[in-house]
Image (cartoon, rainbow, N blue to C red):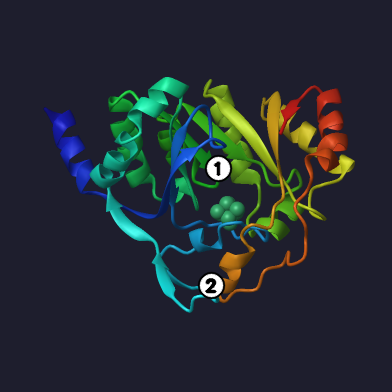
Amino acid sequence: MAGSQTTAAAQELCGLIFNIQKFSTNDGPGVRTTVFFKGCPLRCRWCANPESQDFTPEVLCHAETGKSETTGTWRTVDEVISVCLQDLPFYEESGGGVTLSGGEVLSQPDFAIALLQALQEKGIHTAIETSGFAQPATFRQVAGLSDLLLFDMKHWDGDRHLWGTGVTNELPLANMRTAIADGLAVLPRIPIIPGFNDTTDDAHGFARRLREVGADRCQLLPFHPYGENKYQELGRPYEYTGQKALRPEALQPLIQVLQEEGIDTFL
Ligand code: SF4
């Protein structure tokens, strides 16, 4: 049967993965395993996972121990699935599943598709965490195999989006609009970054964009500086040195604006 040949071929595929994190509770419903894809076309200035950006394995040098470690391993679909299946009882008990994150999942579409298909064949709930930056045909293929899209919206303004991430927001916005129009489950998520998108004017701008693409809810993700050590280990400068994590209370004015604009908003 053609389907089984396709599956066999898909299992030969390898994806560049830099982490598989078990018992995640912030990447979708229930208890989840999060599979982190390596490689991203964006360069967000605040990126908490700088080791996720390059499309090749990299060496991290730990300052304290002097030891080095390579991040990024080529893995087959079967290898990733076998790790995910170890926690099947937890998914079933909690309503959880597997989330593909990154990096950018859409930048390794063949591997993402094969993995999502294999997970769905096993009845496992699937989610992807994405910037939405991919050609529409690629996006639709991957998104259509995901039970939930955790869809980042970095800035409402195109020029500011370009400044903050290195790319414009046209593709992500078009893809978010398509996903919502297609009836997919989309949760827009906005990382709130000090000095970039954290004013009440920004909140009005986000509300406008969300309405334009047909969204009526969003989650705000407060800035945290947890990635700082990784920049040191990669020998790269970090633009947010000394910037403290945003407290949830600091986001209340933004939540209020978004709520008043008809967007169901939560942290
Ligand atoms: S999209 Fe995510 S992984 Fe890519 S640079 Fe931005 S924060 Fe980092």
| Residue occupying the point 82% across, 47% down | 198
Q: Quadrant of the C terminus?
A: top right
x and y percentages locating residue 86 in the rendered image: 31, 36
Q: CA distance from mark 2 to mark 1?
A: 26 Å
Q: Which residue is mark 1?
A: 132
x and y percentages locating residue 83 in the rendered image: 31, 42
Q: Nearer the viewer, residue 83 or 41?
A: 83
Q: Is residue 237 visible?
A: yes
Query: Looking at the rendering, which quadrant does residue 251 occupy?
Result: top right
Element type where label 2 sits in the image: helix
Residue 88, disc: none
Q: Which residue is mark 2?
A: 234
Q: Nearer the viewer, residue 203 or 231?
A: 231
Q: Residue furthest left?
A: 1
| Residue occupying the point 34% across, 38% down | 84
Q: Tell me which numbered mark, 2 or 1, is placed earlier along the sequence.
A: 1
| Residue occupying the point 58% across, 25% down | 180
Circle 2: residue type: Leu
Q: Quadrant of ligand 1?
A: bottom right
Up the image or down, 15 lies above or below 181; here it is below
Up the image or down, 89 lies above or below 166; here it is above
Circle 1: residue type: Gly
Q: Nearer the viewer, residue 98 or 226?
A: 226
Q: Is residue 204 visible?
A: no
Q: Residues within 10 Å of mark 2 (few under 14, many from 20)?
A: some
Q: Nearer the viewer, residue 74 or 224?
A: 224
Element type where label 1 sits in the image: loop
